[in-house]
Amino acid sequence: MFKVYIQLFRLKPIPMIMLMVVFAHLYALNETGLSFQWIPLLVLVLTTGLANAATFALNQYYERHGDAKMERTQSRPIPAGQISPRKALVAGLVVFALGLALQYVLINPMTALATFLCGGLYVWTYTPLKSRYTTSTLFGSLPGALLPFIGWYSVTQGVDLMILWMSLMIFLWQIPHTFVICHRYKDQYQAAGGKQLPFVAGEDASFRQSVWYTLINVPLIFVPFMFRISGGVYLIIATIVTLGALVMVSRFYNRREGNSARQFFRYMLMYLPVLFVSMALDRVNP
């Protein structure tokens, strides 16, 4: 049964999520001049991890009928009959509430609110919209864009330019990321009743948007350098990895086959971590 719950809470994407939250937390410490402490960071990671894992469990509950129609998701605990929908729903709600309550008490209400919005938008907005509207991808990008605010609010309040920049970069990143997944599993998504852009407006539309949303990164990577947050080393690395992203998305656009889709997907998984880490390591005014 333990393995079933591990699959239900989908721990695999959690490290990527935590990276964004931790990075924003460390950035906030730097900006406020506060000293680093392990215990607050571990509390943030634990509570955010609980809430996000619960979000994935709730997502599986609400998508259980569609998951049963898709080969890539048929083995998930609910469609595979390893756990009842009711137990999955209760487990998801309890763990989600636990993560939020711990954040509210041990960190602060604003962090808990940002985490609630992140999970709530994913489960109760993005999930039902996927089978109804092509704009679901835009709504689905909002939860990820809130991740930097969770880390930021765990240290301080207000709004910071670089947190807004991080949020925008994550938002833009998720759109071609979603489209390439839709392309790789298009037959399964269509069988499950998916109404994302590629299945309604045609794949040409999603290919073009993948290129455009990747192109928007080009001027945006200059923001940390222009505002003297990071220096020339960051700018060189950011330029190289962004040009690499353009090469990958162009290859995906022109070839439109499985291998180019996989390469673009894998490349973009490392794109944001490299961008954010290089920004942190080349601080101009630490």
Image (tube, rainbow, N blue to C red):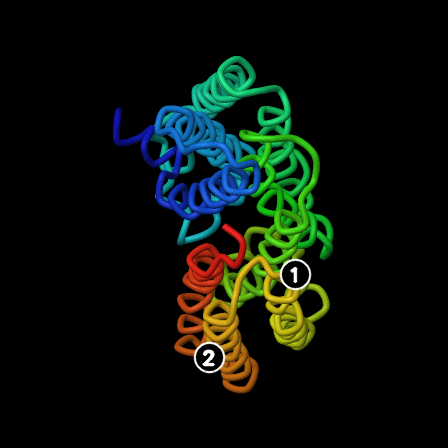
Under mark 1, the amino acid is Phe
User: Horizontal placement of 283 versus 190: left or right?
Assistant: left
Q: Which residue is mark 2?
A: 257
Residue 130: mark = none
In the depicted view, which residue is nearer to us: 53 or 273? Answer: 273
Above or below for 255 versus 280: below
Residue at numbered disc 1: 227
Q: Nearer the viewer, residue 238 or 119?
A: 238
Whether residue 263 sits left or right of residue 142 in the image: it is left
Which residue is located at x 62 percent, y 31 percent? 114
With respect to residue 274, does 37 lie above or below?
A: above
Q: How many numbered marks are there?
A: 2
Q: CA distance from mark 2 to mark 1?
A: 40 Å
Task: Give the image quarter of residue 36.
Answer: top left
Q: Nearer the viewer, mark 2 or mark 1?
A: 1
Tell me which residue sits at (39%, 27%) in the image. Answer: 46
Q: Residue 59: horizontal and vertical position, in percent? A: 53, 36
Query: In terms of sequence position, does the residue under pointer 2 or pointer 1 come before the other?
Result: 1
Residue 241: horizontal and vertical position, in percent? 47, 73
